[in-house]
Amino acid sequence: MTASQEAHDVQHLKSQFKFYPDYPKPGINFCDILPVLRDPLSFEMLISHLVNHVFNHTIPALAAQKKGAKIDYVVGLDARGFLLGPILAMRLGAGFVPVRKQGKLPGECQQAIYEKEYGQDIFEMQTSSLKPGSNVLVVDDLIATGGSAKAAGELVKKLGSTTVEYLFVVAIPFLKGTDKLDGPSYSMIDID
Ligand SMILES: O=P(O)(O)OC[C@H]1O[C@H](OP(=O)(O)OP(=O)(O)O)[C@H](O)[C@@H]1O
Ligand SMILES: Nc1ncnc2[nH]cnc12
C-alpha cells in the first residue's frame, strides 16, 4: 500500500469517529470509534491497517532480534480492546487473551491497579493464560494517559512474558500516555 493510500484510509476512518464533549466527566472529549464497526468496509480497512503494520514492521523488528520469533498472543483490554483483539489475533495466527476489570475472570488471577483519564480501576489476567516466555501484542482502541495500557503491560510481565508492542487505533499525544509504557507503541490516528 502506498503512503497516499494509507493517508486516505486514516482520513476516512478519522471522519467516522464521533466526539462527545464532557463525557463521561466534564473536561473529557470522548472519542467514540464504534461507528467504524458499523460499516464492514471501514472495519476491514481498520483491521487490515493494523495487520499490515504488524507484518511489515513489528514482526521484522522482532525477527531481527531473534530469528524465527513470532507473536504468540494478542492481549486485548476490557472492553473496547475486545472488539479488535480477537480478529487481529486470528489474522496474525496468534492466540487471544483478555485483560478484564476486577471480578470478571474465574480461577487464579494477577492484578494491577491503575489510574486512567477519568478514574481508578483494577485489571486482572488469569495466571495461566499466557505460556511464560511468550511474545505479546497489547491492543486497545485508544491510549489517553496510558494508565490502562501500562497496567496491562505489568500483568503480561507478571505472567513471565514480553510485550513486543502496544497497538492502538487512536492516541491523544498531549496526554503523553506512551511515555508510561515499557516498550514500543503504534497508533494509527492522533487526535487532540
Ligand atoms: O490511557 P487511559 O487514560 O488509561 O485511557 C484509555 C482507556 O480508557 C478507555 O477504556 P475505559 O476505561 O473507559 O473502559 P471501557 O472500554 O470498558 O469503556 C479506553 O478504551 C482505554 O482502555
Ligand atoms: N477521551 C477519551 N475517549 C475515549 N476513551 C477514552 N479513554 C480515556 N480517555 C478517553
Image (spheres, rainbow, N blue to C red):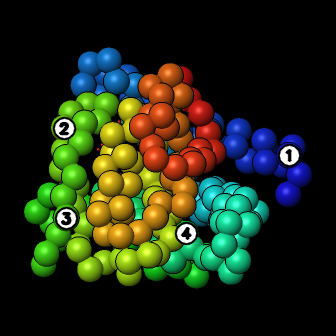
Q: Earlier in the sequence, mark 3 or mark 4?
A: 4
Name the residue beneath numbered marker 1.
Answer: 3
Amino acid of disc 4: Leu
Q: Quadrant of residue 28?
A: top left
Residue carrying label 2: 120
Picture residue at 29% right of the left edge, 36% below the top: 116
At 26% across and 80% down in the image, what residue appears? 128
Question: What is the crowding at mark 1: few (fewer than 14 residues within 10 Å), some, or many (at least 20)?
Answer: few
Whether label 3 touches label 1, CB < 8 Å: no
Image depth: mark 3 or mark 2 in front: 3
Secondary structure under badge 3? Answer: strand
Question: Where does label 4 land, which residue?
Answer: 88
Question: For numbered disc 4, what is the local secondary structure?
Answer: helix
**What's the CA distance linking mark 4 and mark 2?**
28 Å
Disc with the residue nearer the chain's start (4 vs 1): 1
Marker disc for residue 110: 3
